[in-house]
Image: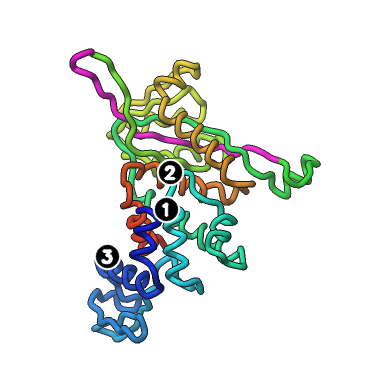
């Protein structure tokens, strides 16, 4: 969706609310009191009324817009900006584009959308052939690190991120040339390098017992073979980076470049949210204009 079609379709608060209701109706509304699924629509209140217990559910209730004072139009413009480019926008730039005076509500709105993106992708697991490696992302040092390392404000540190790519091998029948193509990705911040933390992150992300995993020979991957059909590990080298773990390293490189180009600084506790946005758009890189519609759905189901 380009800016001209967006402004033509969503030119008012009512147009955005009406579209949001249409999408929510498709997904269905469940009464929070009795779990009934049939409702009346009270247009004067922009609320649903349960046919069984008469409890009311506002249009925003149960979505990530719940309790937000920002208009539907502002939310829709923000979702459009987040999906309009591969690179994305910082909260400060979105505030400027929207012409809003206060930064804090915009920051909270954008992070809620990033959380919804992550929740949406967490519904799916990777399967088949999976590349796995870790990348070190530059983040702002915490207050504790400032004090213990006697470093000044604005100093940097590193955070470890596990990146996984669902790849497939394709062979050209005429030439015999074999290439690996990639479908979906996942990226999760790791608390430490210990095997227990790595195992849990890995198990939550993949279809166990039905996958073949490629990785380097990190000691934190010692248990991976217990969860998959085959685990193939190779010593880290230039060849491993360019061939066996090609797509993982492309994703890590692109994510780092994206963050440096768009964000002034990232704190560790918010790094996962930035990764959520990057991976969400990466996994939907062929969706075209539909990615905006998918983010609206993530908004509805993302709590």
- Determine contact: label 1, label 2, CB under 8 Å: yes
Residue 117 disc label: 1
- Determine contact: label 3, label 1, CB under 8 Å: no
**Rendered residue at 42%/52% (across/down):** 83
**Rendered residue at 42%/64% (across/down):** 76
Asked whether residue 160 is drawn in magenta, I would say yes
Category of crowding for the residue at label 2, using alpha-carbon neighbours closer than 10 angstroms: few (below 14), some (14–19), many (at least 20): many
Q: Position of residue 184 (x, y in %)?
A: 35, 39
Instruction: Tell me if residue 109 comes above or below residue 88 in the rendering.
Output: below
Instruction: Tell me if residue 123 comes above or below residue 196 in the rendering.
Output: below
- Residue beneath label 2, please? 279
**Rendered residue at 31%/76% (across/down):** 31
User: What residue span does the magenta drawing correspond to?
Assistant: 156-175
Q: Position of residue 114 (x, y in %)?
A: 47, 54
Category of crowding for the residue at label 1, using alpha-carbon neighbours closer than 10 angstroms: few (below 14), some (14–19), many (at least 20): many
Q: Secondary structure at mark 2?
A: helix
Tell me which numbered mark, 3 or 2, is placed earlier along the sequence: 3
Residue nearest the viewer, comparing 104 with 98: 98
Instruction: Tell me if residue 42 comes above or below residue 13 in the rendering.
Output: below
Category of crowding for the residue at label 3, using alpha-carbon neighbours closer than 10 angstroms: few (below 14), some (14–19), many (at least 20): few
Q: Give the Cα separation between the discs numbered 1 and 2.
A: 9 Å
Q: Position of residue 275 (x, y in %)?
A: 49, 45
Q: Secondary structure at mark 3?
A: helix
Residue nearest the viewer, comparing 27 with 103: 103
Residue 266 shown left or right of residue 252 in the figure: right
- Residue beneath label 3, please? 27
């Amino acid at each position: 969706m380009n800016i001209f079609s967006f402004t033509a379709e969503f030119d008012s608060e009512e147009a955005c609310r009406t579209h949001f209701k249409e999408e929510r109706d498709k997904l269905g509304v469940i009464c929070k009191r009795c779990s009934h699924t049939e409702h009346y629509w009270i247009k004067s209140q922009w609320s649903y009324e349960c046919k069984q217990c008469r409890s009311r559910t506002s249009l925003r209730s149960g979505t990530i817009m719940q309790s937000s004072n920002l208009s539907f139009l502002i939310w829709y413009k923000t979702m459009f900006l987040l999906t309009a480019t591969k690179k994305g926008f910082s909260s400060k730039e979105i505030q400027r584009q929207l012409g809003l005076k206060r930064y804090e509500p915009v920051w909270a709105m954008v992070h809620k959308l990033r959380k919804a993106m992550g929740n949406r992708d967490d519904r799916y697991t990777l399967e088949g052939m999976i590349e796995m490696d870790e990348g070190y992302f530059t983040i702002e040092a915490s207050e504790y690190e400032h004090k213990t390392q006697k470093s000044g404000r604005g100093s940097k540190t590193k955070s470890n991120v596990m990146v996984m790519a669902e790849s497939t091998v394709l062979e050209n029948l005429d030439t015999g040339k074999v290439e690996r193509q990639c479908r979906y990705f996942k990226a999760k911040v790791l608390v430490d390098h210990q095997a227990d933390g790595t195992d849990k992150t890995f198990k939550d992300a993949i279809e166990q017992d039905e996958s073949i995993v490629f990785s380097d020979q990190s000691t934190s991957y010692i248990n991976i073979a217990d969860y998959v059909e085959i685990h193939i590990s190779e010593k880290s080298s230039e060849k491993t980076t360019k061939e066996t773990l090609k797509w993982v390293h492309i994703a890590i490189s692109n994510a780092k470049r994206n963050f440096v180009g768009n964000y002034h600084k990232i704190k560790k506790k918010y790094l996962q949210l930035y990764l959520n946005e990057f991976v969400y758009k990466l996994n939907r890189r062929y969706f075209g204009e539909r990615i905006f519609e998918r983010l609206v759905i993530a908004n509805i189901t993302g709590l």
